[in-house]
Amino acid sequence: MTEQEYKMLQKRLTNKLCHSPYGPASSSKYKEGYREGILVAKSVLHGFFQDYPPGDFGDSA
């Protein structure tokens, strides 16, 4: 994964975090679960990028 791809994925996840599909009438548990899921995905992506920097899989840096 290139740094540009990493940044794009992080930005898309951040956008999802800011634009939750759950409205004001939705259960707070659903909203919190959605938020936590997005944050976990961002964390896993960050960890992957740290463990396998650009070039490790034959992609260009």
Image (tube, rainbow, N blue to C red):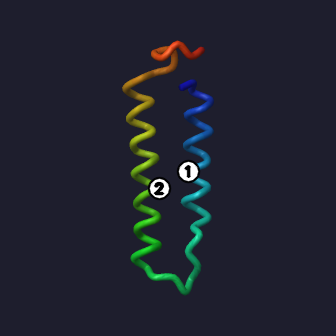
Q: Which mark is residue 13?
A: 1
- Specify the farthest residue to the bottom: 25
Whole-Å distance between the Cαs marked 1 and 2? 6 Å
Q: Quadrant of residue 46?
A: top left
Give me the residue at 55% from left, 50% from top.
13
Residue 8 pos. (x, y %): 62, 39
Q: CB under 8 Å between callouts 1 and 2?
A: yes
Q: Quadrant of residue 9?
A: top right
**Where is the N terminus found, in terms of image quarters?**
top right
Q: Is residue 17 left or right of residue 29?
A: right
Q: Is residue 54 above or below residue 21?
A: above
Q: Which mark is residue 47?
A: none
Q: Is residue 23 left or right of residue 50?
A: right
- Specify the farthest residue to the front: 57
Callout 1 secondary element: helix
Q: Which residue is mark 2?
A: 38
* Residue type indicated by callout 1: Leu
Q: Residues within 10 Å of mark 1 (few under 14, many from 20)?
A: some
Q: Is residue 15 above or below residue 45?
A: below
* Residue type indicated by callout 2: Ile
Q: Earlier in the sequence, mark 1 or mark 2?
A: 1
Q: Is residue 47 left or right of residue 15?
A: left
Give me the residue at 51% from left, 19% from top.
54
Q: Residues within 10 Å of mark 2 (few under 14, many from 20)?
A: some
Q: Is residue 9 above or below residue 58?
A: below
Give me the residue at 44% from left, 74% from top.
30
Give me the residue at 45% from left, 82% from top.
27
Q: Is residue 22 above or below residue 51?
A: below
Q: Quadrant of residue 51?
A: top left
**Where is the C terminus found, in terms of image quarters?**
top right
Residue 19 pos. (x, y %): 61, 64
